[in-house]
Image: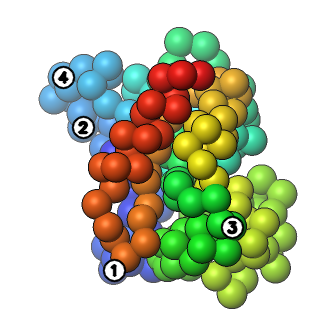
Amino acid sequence: MGIGHPEATSDYRRPYATIVDYLDALDAAEVPVAGRALAALGPKVLALSAERTAGAHPYLTTPEHTREARALLGDGVLLAPEHKVVLDTDAERARAVGRPVVAKPYLGLRNYTSNLLRLGWAADDIADGGSDRLIDALVAHGDAAAVAARLAEHVDAGADHVCAQVLTEGFRDPLPALRELAEALRLR
């Protein structure tokens, strides 16, 4: 579960307090802690994930964020970051597929840009659809083995699971790329 974005809804409320209220309601309804996870990016909500849920599902992150998230969550708490991937060895083509997905809406949403700034990215990296360096960090690309190695960086940093979001040119069927990536991951 997540809180949403102030840029996307007029019903937006303070995120942390709203999440706490919702978790209190789940507790009152006796919803098992093991059946919930938070879409957590920042340190406060990551800590709340460890205290009140089975884990965290950070979105639009890097292995560096995963390392920091694991340190905040501690052991025994699910950490399942998302990472976008494009199976293409041509960097320019891969960026042409990945950049639009990252730029709109994510680089226009305060929670994602704040997280990127917290991770050390500069405002210039975030501006104008994202620098090549930022897009390369957020959208793994290359052949299946190279992408599998990038996803493995999350596991090495403490992830229990990595949610690979396969992006394709023209929104083609992602299943062939998923199969190829699954095979590369199996061989690791």
Gap between marks 4 and 3, in whole Å? 49 Å
Residue density around tag 2, few if under 14, some if 14–19, many if 20 or more, within 10 Å = few
* Label 1 vs 2, first from the N-terminus: 1
Depth check, mark 1 against mark 2: the one in front is 1
Q: Amino acid at mark 1?
A: Ser
Residue 92 in the figure: left or right of residue 80: right
Using the image, tell me which numbered label, if any, was put on residue 91: 3
Return the residue at label 1.
10
Residue density around tag 4, few if under 14, some if 14–19, many if 20 or more, within 10 Å = few
Using the image, tell me which numbered label, if any, was put on residue 28: none
Single out the residue that lies furthest toward the top: 76
Spot occupied by residue 139 in the image (x, y as percentages of width and height) = 60, 58
* Label 3 vs 1, first from the N-terminus: 1
Return the residue at label 2.
25
Q: Does 78 appear above or below 138? A: above
Q: Does residue 42 appear in this view?
A: no
Residue at 34% across / 49% down in the picture? 176
* Label 4 vs 3, first from the N-terminus: 4
Q: Label 3: state its secondary structure.
A: helix
Depth check, mark 4 against mark 3: the one in front is 3
Q: Nearer the viewer, residue 86 or 107?
A: 86
Q: Nearer the viewer, residue 31 or 100?
A: 100
Gap between marks 3 and 2, in whole Å? 47 Å
Spot occupied by residue 123 in the image (x, y as percentages of width and height) = 79, 76
Gap between marks 1 and 4, in whole Å? 30 Å
Q: Label 2: state its secondary structure.
A: helix
